[in-house]
Structures are given as structure tokens and as C-alpha cells.
Image (cartoon, rainbow, N blue to C red):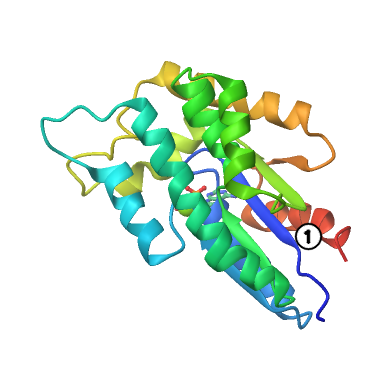
């Protein structure tokens, strides 16, 4: 049987640099002959991507309950873990995932003020044993993240449901991620995402090197 791969998740606000750094880390690992797949949440399977589309872009007069959003997130996660992440890890591949269950704790728990203990149980139910070996939290002042993503939306009329929320919501999420880092200090590592792309990459490589 192949040696199980490592599971690394990237967390942090929009614009923090996750996608940029996932691509660099993938190159770094591939150059070391490590087979690696990159994926994202919500999403990562055909069904989960459909749920992502509903979660992020559902429009119409029907109010989408926060509870519905939470369960759709977890349903997407179950599909993703079972059909993609577990399969790859068992096949010896490394998995780098753009957001994972810490985002549910931060956005639905802290951001939407839903019961944190219930979310912890739901997350555990969804992922089972498939807990990340390493989670990297991109620490960046909110204003800098907004500034970096401004260009992304310059030609779009509407932000999606998450991006149009108010600043207090984002402050609570930021606080949530800080609590998550503090409460899971073995698994979750904070990096300074305000530095240059190359400097951030170096911080990530140092953390990932401990996984070999
Ligand atoms: N360290 C950095 N310094 C300055 N700009 C950055 C840095 N990392 C990424 N960017 C830029 O900021 C924007 C958002 O980066 P991205 O990787 O898409 O963030 P995320 O995936 O976390 O939303 C992109 O335009 C990207 O080129
Ligand atoms: Mg991204």
C-alpha cells in the first residue's frame, strides 16, 4: 500500500493570496516529485460545484436561511471528502485545498453567529478522520484584502452574496480565524500575508518542509 499523502488547507479572507500561493506550492512540491492535486471548497466534485453555485449565486425572492447555507456547505464537503480528497490521499497524493472546514466555523459560526459547538459537530460528521495535516492561515488586514480584490470586481456589477456583506461581518470572521489559530495551534499556522508573494511563499515552504 502507498504511503498516505498529506492534506494541507489554506484559509483566510478574500484577497489574502491563497490562490496565488496554492499555485506556487504546487510547483514547489511537483519539483520534489510529489504528486499533488489542488482543489477548493465549497466545490471539488460535480455535485459539490453545483451546490457552490447555489450557495454563492442563488437569486430570487426566496430567502435562503443561514441554516440552509450551512447544511449545503456540509453536504458539498461530504461529497468532496469522500470522492476526491480521501481517494487522492489513499493513492499517496498530496491534497492542497483552498478553504476547508475552518471557513465554515469562521463564516457561518462567527460571521453568521450560528452555534459554534453545533458547527464543530457538523464539521466532524462531514469529514470523519479526514482532518488536515496542516492548515495555513493567511493573516492580512481587512483593508489590504479589499484593496487586492478591488480589481477583480471592477468590471462586475454585483458582488456575490458573501462579498456584499458589511464590514462587521468580516471583522467577526477575522476574529473567528484568530480564535481557530489559537485553539488549534498544532494544526493551524499563521503566516504574514502582507509580505511579498515570494516572502509569503518562503514562509509556506518552511511550514510544509516539516511535513516531509
Ligand atoms: N503577497 C502579495 N502581495 C501583493 N499582492 C498579492 C499578493 N498575493 C496575491 N496578490 C494579488 O492579490 C490578488 C488576490 O490574490 P489571490 O491569490 O487571488 O487571493 P485569494 O485567493 O486569497 O482571494 C491577486 O490580484 C494577486 O495577484
Ligand atoms: Mg482565491
Q: Is residue 102 visible?
A: yes
Of residues 192 and 122, which is closer to you in this image?
Answer: 122
Q: Is residue 152 left or right of residue 104?
A: left
Residue 77 position in % (x across, y down): 51, 51
Q: Is residue 98 left or right of residue 42?
A: right
Residue 155 position in % (x across, y down): 21, 49
Tell me the quadrant of the picture where the C terminus can be found.
Answer: bottom right
Residue 208 placement: quadrant? bottom right
Identify the residue at horizontal 74%, vertical 81% (top origin): 31
Of residues 84 and 97, which is closer to you in this image?
Answer: 84
Count of picture labels: 1
Of residues 74 and 203, which is closer to you in this image?
Answer: 74
Query: Is disc 1's CB within 8 Å of ligand 1?
Result: no
Q: Is residue 194 visible?
A: no
Identify the residue at horizontal 25%, vertical 44% (top origin): 57
Can you say whether 2 is above or below 132 in the image?
Answer: below
Residue 90 position in % (x across, y down): 72, 72
Q: Which residue is mark 1?
A: 205
Identify the residue at horizontal 76%, vertical 69% (top origin): 5
Can you say whether 203 is above or below 114 in the image?
Answer: below
* Helix, strand or loop at mark 1: helix
Of residues 168 and 67, which is closer to you in this image?
Answer: 67
Can you say whether 42 is above or below 32 in the image?
Answer: above
Identify the residue at horizontal 76%, vertical 63% (top origin): 6
Tell me the quadrant of the picture where the N terminus can be found.
Answer: bottom right
Amino acid at each position: 500500500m502507498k504511503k498516505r499523502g498529506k492534506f494541507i488547507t489554506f484559509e483566510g479572507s478574500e484577497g489574502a493570496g491563497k490562490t496565488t500561493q496554492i499555485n506556487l506550492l504546487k510547483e514547489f512540491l511537483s519539483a520534489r516529485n510529489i504528486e499533488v492535486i489542488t482543489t477548493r471548497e465549497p466545490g471539488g466534485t460535480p455535485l459539490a460545484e453545483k451546490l457552490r453555485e447555489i450557495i454563492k449565486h442563488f437569486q430570487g425572492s426566496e430567502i435562503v436561511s443561514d441554516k440552509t447555507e450551512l447544511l449545503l456547505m456540509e453536504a458539498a464537503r461530504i461529497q468532496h471528502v469522500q470522492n476526491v480528497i480521501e481517494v487522492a490521499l489513499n493513492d499517496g497524493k498530496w491534497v492542497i485545498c483552498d478553504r476547508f472546514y475552518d471557513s465554515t466555523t469562521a463564516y457561518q459560526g462567527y460571521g453568521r453567529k450560528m452555534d459554534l459547538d453545533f458547527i464543530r459537530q457538523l464539521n466532524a460528521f462531514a469529514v470523519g478522520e479526514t482532518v488536515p495535516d496542516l492548515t495555513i492561515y493567511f493573516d492580512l488586514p481587512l483593508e489590504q484584502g479589499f484593496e487586492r480584490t478591488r480589481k477583480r470586481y471592477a468590471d462586475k456589477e454585483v458582488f456575490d452574496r458573501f462579498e456584499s456583506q458589511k464590514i462587521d461581518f468580516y471583522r467577526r470572521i477575522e476574529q473567528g480565524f484568530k480564535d481557530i489559530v489559537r485553539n488549534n495551534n498544532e494544526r493551524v499556522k499563521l503566516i504574514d500575508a502582507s509580505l511579498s508573494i515570494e516572502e509569503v511563499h518562503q514562509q509556506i515552504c518552511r511550514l510544509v518542509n516539516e511535513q516531509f
